[in-house]
Amino acid sequence: MDSDKKTFQSQVSIASLDTGIDLSHPFPKGKIAEEDCYDFVEGRAGITDLAGHGTHTASLLLKTAPRAKIYGAKVFKSWNADNDMAQRLADVSLGLLNTITPIVDGV
């Protein structure tokens, strides 16, 4: 098999920490469970992606690993430096901790 055509065939778990994921987008639709996602920027369930970057990233992850279980965490409002660095680091830390925990617990 050509190296550019390799994909992961087994079930893998991936934590996606980004600007969120548009769960209605055609590519990730039905492949990412909303209950596996959380918005750490707003402190609520759901991860609406207003920037589009997280949706693009999740689509690339699913293209590479089509059987992956994606745990999404919205940790950035956008890729602009609007919010202060300390808050962004706190959101990333919470997102990482809370997406990794179910992955590790499930192993």
Image (tube, grey):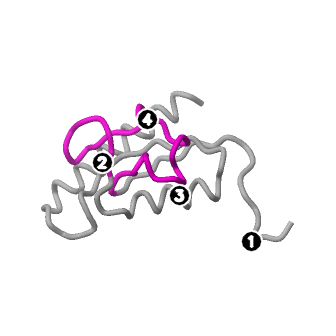
Dot 1 or dot 2, earlier in sequence:
1
Q: 107 left or right of 23? A: right
31 in the magenta segment: yes
Q: Name the residue under label 4.
A: 36
Q: Nearer the viewer, mark 3 or mark 4?
A: 3
Numbered badge on residue 4: 1
Q: Which of marks 1 and 2 is in front?
A: 1
Say which residue appears at 46% left-offset and 53% top-offset: 25
Of residue 70 and residue 95, the one placed in the foreground of this image is 70
Instruction: State the residue position of label 3.
Output: 59
Disc 3 element:
helix
Q: Do the residues labelled 4 and 1 touch (CB within 8 Å)?
A: no
Write down the quadrant of residue 45 in the picture: top left
- The disc, 4 or 2, on the residue closer to the chain's N-terminal end is 4
Q: Quadrant of the N terminus?
A: bottom right
Do residues under tags 3 and 4 come within 8 Å of each other at their CB atoms?
A: no
For disc 2, the marked residue is 93
Q: Is residue 4 left or right of residue 78?
A: right
Question: What percent of the width, then of the height, locates residue 69?
Answer: 56, 41
Q: For numbered disc 1, what is the local secondary structure?
A: helix
Q: Estimate the x, y position of residue 83 in percent, counting from the top left.
A: 14, 61
Q: What residue type is labelled 1?
A: Asp
**Mark 4: few, some, or many residues within 10 Å (few <14, many ≥20)?**
some
Residue 13 placement (x, y as % from top left): 57, 42
From the top left corner, tell me how far across and down residue 72 is, in percent: 42, 45
CA gap, disc 3 to disc 4? 16 Å
How crowded is the residue under tag 2: few (<14 C-alpha within 10 Å), some, or many (20+)? some
Q: Does the magenta stretch include residue 45?
A: yes
